[in-house]
Image (cartoon, helix red, strand yellow):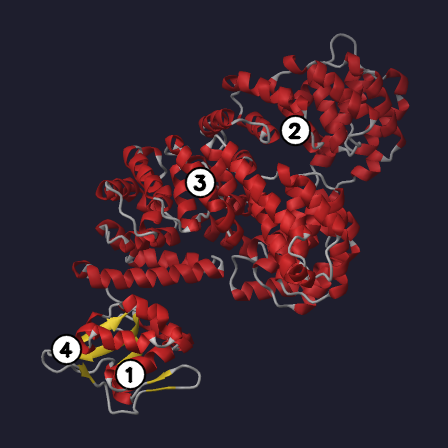
Amino acid sequence: MWGTMFRLNCLRPSLRRLLHGAVGSRDQVLEGLQVCSAEDQVLDMVGKNKAKLTVEHVSLAVRMLWEFQKERPELLRTVHLIKNHQQFLTLRVLAENKIAQMDDFTLIDMLYAFLRLNVEPHDSLVQQMVSEAWLRLDRLPMPSLSKFAVVLNDQHLQSSPLMGHITSILDQRLSSIDDARILTALMISVSSLVSTRLRDALISRAEYLLHTIDPLNYNTPRRMVQFLRNVKYIHRPLLEKCNEIFLRNIPRLDAENISLILGLYQSLQFNNCDFRLAAKERLTELIDTSTDPFSFSKLFVALAPIGSPEIRERLENTTLLVADEFSAQQALAVTEALEEIQSRNLSLLNKIASVIQKNLHAYKSVEVARITQALFLLHYQNPELFATLRKVLASFLQRSFYPYEVTMLTRVLSMLPSPRLDEGVVSRVDDVIAQCNLSELNTISFAVAKWIRNDPSYRHNTHSRYVRLLQRLSHFGHERLQTADRLDLVLEELKYVSGEWFEEMLLEETIVTLKRMMDQINPTTVPDLAFFLTRTNHLYPPLMDRIASVATEHINKIHFSATYATLLPFSVLNYEPVNADELYDACIKRFTPHISSFDPHLLVLLAYSLAVADRFPEELIREIFSIDFLGKLDCQLESLPDALNMRTRQRLMELNRAVCLECPEFQVPWFHERYCQQLQRKGNGSVSPVQQQIHKMLGEVLGGINFVQAAVTTPYFYTVDFECKVDKHLKPLSYSEPGTLQISDRGKVLWDSSSLESGQDELPAGAQRSPTLNGTPWSFLHTTLGRNILERKFWDDPFFFPLALFIR
């Protein structure tokens, strides 16, 4: 009895209204349904009262069946048993016959429930209900419209005319929506059709409604983040507000939800240190309770990339025990996580590969591509599996007409070795090139370049299919740039574009296009444009000046964390605009009040870029070199990918060095001595063959190899290519007795013991050191030996011809 009452209390308010909605005479069928406590009882009631069932009875029965299922964990649901029950077929027939009698709410609610009970979208019942809902679309209340949009999205109709109609209605009625749950369901459903204006309006409304939701409700903000992922737009204010709600709910989040949120953040390149650390702690707590394949696979995917080596080993050992029970999707997710952590557990890889091979027929094209890429990047050796994957990928590609899908499959196919390229693959790529965006064209160019390298026949046929493909790629790339009229869309396509083909064929045309659109540079596009110029390492002063001007004037409209991307090209490209001081002052003033809100690693990178530009804001420097900050940075670095971890540590060392040298008044200690020594032991003391030859020739010029040192390390571990000492008359001085300084066969400098201990030799009075970093300066040599001697020495040797030009 208590179980019955509990289930009835869980029913939606609308369902309770139906349960108590009898007016006048008693409705025995309704009362009978009311007291049902399980699916079989509902279905028995349907079977005994077929002739008496009204629309209300059918609606109630269908919704009760779904409510009972929804209460259970996914693994314990019995939808397949309901679907195959004879009386469920009765309900479907009755529902189809009574569609015209249903009110709007009942129609949409029943459609939703039937689909959740796995009635196929192509079933006549579903198709007739969808058609009826379309006829009533303009009058549907917003809750029903929202649920109908979810139904269409689940049926992959997100780009249909019907969804376009819903998008138009949403645009008109947006201001009347006061329920965040209704709004977010609509946002996700129409995300592929929204304009920039509607996108911004939806985000604004979502921000407003976010303050009205229960702080324990984390599903609504998760859907908001999912919308941002779908539209590929990083709106940091909304992301940060959603992140605050996630952090408050960390103790209540399970592995599945944490995995979802981390995946969304990764797609948006939004890296929040506080959430990652909290998620890591929470996931570690869940290890012992995540024992079934479903929950454990979610845990593995979320925790393995951010866990310690010990946790990773523990997770891999457990995965070995449960891998045989993984579904196709779980095996895919675990494979990608193994690639992310670069696992070398061959036994585990073999087991996962076995599960994948067994379920290969169940995967879609995108999933086969993801599997192939992950296994390839893991250097997994299984020629038979890769041959099968290649065959499946080629089959998918030759049947596809979607540019994004053809591009993705082409890229993954080009990774795999092949004696010859299937003509059907080249033909399909050629067919879709005209529809590709700049990013897709660039991706195909990488694939073609790999095919050229792997095909020996290319050298004997310069007018081959590859050349024609490259010519068409270039043609459509130029055409797309020349016809583009919106800067934000161009920057979106250029976000991940790189490589030789782009630099040689499209970079110049891209700069022309960006110059043509300079009047569209605004606070929203400034960070993306600045990032593009940094990534391509291309200096174009008019664009840089425009960025500086817009950023200075509208700095308060640029998110404080975006000041890093905005300033980066000026540091990296060593360019100072006319208003350089105003630009840096405005950006420093913008981010300073929010220093504590930055992710630690991003704050280090920001401070380093400012240091390169000879800017050392005191508040920023003191924050970074505080004990609390460095402790937080250490914790964050443990959860970052290895490459970003190493880069951040290197930048912190270089920032520490710069502050010690440039700002001694800050009294920041030099604490990277051991770190630099470790780097030096790993190979920093090696001398390249080119340096060895230059070292030898400089020795001949200066009077002996003991008059010049190579790969000299300064007290703060700057590495100087060569160093000479000259006396007060600018004559070279010897470092040690001839023969003491040698270079080993491996290119290591073999220093004498005294120089190793002291680090630097004592200089006579009036003498000075003259370092050359990357080949400069050489002025002391000009003065000491004369220009003509140097020119003759280096000019006669073709290897050093560029050096002779430099001296000249």
Q: Residue 329: x, y in percent?
A: 70, 49
- Residue at left 16%, top 59%? 665
Q: Determine the CA span between mark 3 and mark 4.
A: 65 Å
Residue linked to disc 1: 699
Residue drawn at 44 percent across, 60 percent down: 645
Disc 2 versus disc 1: distance between alpha carbons?
72 Å
Q: Which residue is mark 2?
A: 159
Direction from residue 166 to residue 738 in the image, left or right: left
Numbered mark located on residue 730 in the image: 4
At mark 3, the secondary structure is: helix
Q: Quadrant of residue 784?
A: bottom left
Residue 266 makes an appearance in the image: yes
- Which corner quadrant of the image does residue 383 belong to? bottom right
Q: Which mark is residue 197?
A: none
Mark 1 or mark 4, which has the lower sequence index? 1
Which quadrant of the figure contains the C terminus? bottom left
The residue sitting at 77% across, 31% down in the picture is 37
Q: Nearer the viewer, residue 535 or 309?
A: 535
Residue with the mark numbered 3 = 244
Is label 2 in a helix, a strand or a loop?
loop
Q: Amino acid at mark 1?
A: Gly
Q: In terms of sequence position, does the residue under pointer 4 or pointer 2 come before the other?
A: 2
758 to the left or right of 160: left
581 and 453: which is toward the camera: 453
Disc 4 crowd, CA 10 A, few/some/many (<14, 14-19, 20+): some
Identified by mark 2, the residue type is Ser
Local packing at callout 3 (Cα closer than 10 Å; few below 14, some 14-19, many 20+) is some
Q: Nearer the viewer, mark 3 or mark 4?
A: 4
- Callout 4, which amino acid? Leu
